[in-house]
């Protein structure tokens, strides 16, 4: 394998990007060389997502593009990694002749052997799911990031079985990575100058090892480097731990931002989705969060047009979103996935046109709410962690507030990785615009001992 050039293209969620960094590390260990584009690679890996149909469609299209590259070149290997592996391995290898190897999310350690099989003239497949694999001993190699913010995966799989979701089938059973290995990785990132880390899991509040639950992990993690901010994604509303809320309020480097997916605002839909909480329980949780953490920013995931969703049920989602006033929302129309409970038990009966219209309604309402919330930020100061140059102009920097809002401001002499106090003077629904006042630090800005920020 030595000296073979590889290229990894990643689709889907942050977890997939974190997985690609693990694969990166495994391939570098083999002496392979990363390249930045498919055309100059000997091996192309595509890390896939199957959460919604359009994610899969994108991957299929890309694979067809790679096929023409394959036709024009000898010895180009194409491998499919991740969530689509199990579901479509037969199709991929036999029917379309697009792909040489298929590797499921728990089989990345096997990639060197599988590459050898391909070199020996065979198609190579490993889609076995594991009850234990957490890649705890593999240090991800972060080649494509900004050097300031990073992700760490703290658990894999999901046992929740929401009826719409294919993740439990593609990524397998829930398992947590040992706390020490997570803390070690945080220490390394801190030494390398990273300033913000997001801890990732399909369902982080069920993180559990022999010696820690999720709050214990966050407690230890937040003590590693007071100048390193921590976020996490995603928790489940059914069992969000209250002690974690107090911890977030106490620790300046635990961000005042929680992504807490509601999925729907109607009790009957929530029941069909197998989300074990009611609209009222969700509101109670949000109220408690805001009571314990003043100034908390919230975001959510919403699915519109789920099986049997009526107009009233849809209106309940709109009214839930209006009541909560999310700072950010990820909104999707329902996409039926094979093997899920919804696929087996319900009919995907909301017409595409109605799904689209409902999605537009919730997006439009959300944009108005966001713009209104952002307007309230005008005049306020925020501690912004600079992530890099703004997309629009080289003369401007961009970074995030503790509450996860993107801020753009004139560069002056500030740099990537700086904490800068910025005063907000304008906004859109997606971005705040401000003026840098001074460089600072988490401890200087919030104080060493403050109990609330
Ligand atoms: N259709 C539409 N959206 C889905 N999600 C998960 N499964 C589906 C599906 N079948 C959304 C949920 C989840 C987010 C990651 O993706 O909102 O929280
Ligand atoms: Fe899917 Fe539900 Fe698990 Fe999230 S919690 S990954 S939506 S099954």
Image (spheres, rainbow, N blue to C red):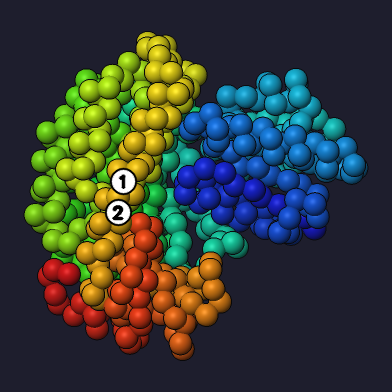
- Please state if 111 lies on the left or on the right of 161 as rendered: right
**Tag 1's secondary structure?**
helix
Residue drawn at x 9%, y 54% is 291
Can the viewer see residue 391 in this picture?
yes
Residue 143 quadrant? bottom right
**Does the numbered disc 1 mark a residue whose Cβ is under 8 Å from ligand 1?**
no
From what the image shows, is residue 32 above or below residue 132? below
Residue drawn at x 34%, y 65% is 427
Task: Tell me how many marks there are.
Answer: 2
Indicate the position of residue 276 as horizontal and vertical percent values: 22, 27
Asked whether the residues under the numbered discs 1 and 2 touch, taking CB atoms below 8 Å apart as contact, a structural biologist would say yes
Indicate the position of residue 35 as horizontal and vertical percent values: 73, 59
How far separated are the C-alphas under marks 1 and 2?
6 Å
**Tag 2's secondary structure?**
helix
Q: How many C-alpha atoms fall within 10 Å of the one at disc 2: few (<14), some, or many (≥20)?
A: many
Locate the C terminus by quadrant: bottom left
Residue drawn at x 14%, y 59% is 293
Which residue is nearer to you in this view: 330 or 123? 330
Q: Which residue is mark 2?
A: 370
Indicate the position of residue 157 as horizontal and vertical percent values: 42, 36
Which residue is nearer to you in this view: 372 or 276? 372
Q: Where residue 180 is drawn, which disc sits there?
A: none
Residue drawn at x 71%, y 52% is 7
Q: How many C-alpha atoms fall within 10 Å of the one at disc 1: few (<14), some, or many (≥20)?
A: many
Indicate the position of residue 145 as horizontal and vertical percent values: 54, 63
Residue 379 quadrant? bottom left
- Please state if 134 lies on the left or on the right of 238 as rendered: right
From what the image shows, is residue 264 above or below residue 364? above
From what the image shows, is residue 19 above or below residue 436? above
Q: Which residue is mark 1?
A: 366
């Amino acid at each position: 394998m030595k000296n073979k050039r590889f290229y990894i293209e990643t689709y889907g969620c942050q977890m997939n990007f974190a997985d690609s960094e693990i694969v990166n590390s495994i391939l570098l260990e083999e002496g392979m060389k990363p390249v930045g584009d498919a055309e100059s690679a000997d091996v192309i890996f595509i890390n896939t997502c199957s959460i919604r149909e359009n994610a899969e469609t994108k991957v299929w299209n890309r694979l067809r593009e790679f096929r023409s590259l394959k036709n024009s070149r000898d010895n180009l290997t194409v491998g499919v990694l991740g969530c689509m592996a199990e579901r479509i391995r037969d199709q991929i290898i036999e029917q379309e002749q697009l792909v040489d190897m298929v590797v499921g999310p728990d089989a990345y350690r096997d990639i060197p052997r599988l590459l050898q099989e391909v070199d020996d003239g065979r198609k190579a497949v490993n889609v076995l799911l594991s009850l234990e694999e957490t890649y705890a001993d593999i240090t991800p190699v972060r080649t494509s990031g900004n050097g300031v913010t990073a992700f760490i995966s703290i658990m894999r799989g999901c046992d929740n079985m929401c009826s719409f979701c294919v993740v439990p089938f593609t990524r397998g059973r829930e398992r947590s990575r040992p706390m020490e290995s997570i803390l070690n990785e945080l220490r390394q990132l801190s030494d390398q100058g990273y300033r913000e880390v997001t801890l990732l899991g399909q369902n982080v509040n069920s993180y559990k090892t022999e010696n820690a639950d999720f709050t214990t992990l966050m407690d230890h993690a937040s003590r590693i480097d007071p100048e390193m901010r921590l976020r996490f994604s995603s928790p489940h509303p059914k069992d969000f731990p209250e002690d974690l809320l107090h911890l977030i309020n106490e620790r300046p480097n635990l961000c005042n931002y929680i992504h807490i997916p509601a999925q729907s605002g109607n009790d009957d839909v929530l029941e069909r989705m197998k989300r074990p909480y009611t609209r009222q329980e969700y509101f109670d949780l949000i109220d408690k969060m805001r009571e314990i953490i003043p100034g908390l920013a919230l975001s959510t995931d919403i699915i519109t047009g789920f099986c049997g969703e009526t107009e009233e049920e849809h209106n309940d989602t709109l009214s839930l979103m209006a009541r909560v006033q999310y700072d950010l929302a990820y909104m999707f129309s329902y996409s039926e996935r094979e093997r899920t409970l919804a696929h087996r038990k319900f009919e995907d009966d909301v017409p595409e046109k109605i799904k689209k219209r409902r999605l537009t309604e919730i997006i439009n309402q959300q944009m108005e709410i966001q713009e209104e919330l952002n307007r309230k930020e005008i005049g306020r100061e925020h501690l912004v962690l600079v992530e890099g140059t703004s997309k629009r102009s080289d003369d401007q920097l961009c970074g995030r507030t503790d509450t996860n809002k993107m801020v753009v401001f004139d560069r002056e002499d500030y740099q990537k990785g700086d904490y800068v106090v910025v005063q907000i003077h304008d906004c859109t629904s997606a971005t705040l615009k401000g003026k840098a006042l001074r460089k600072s630090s988490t401890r200087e800005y919030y104080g060493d001992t403050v109990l609330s920020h």
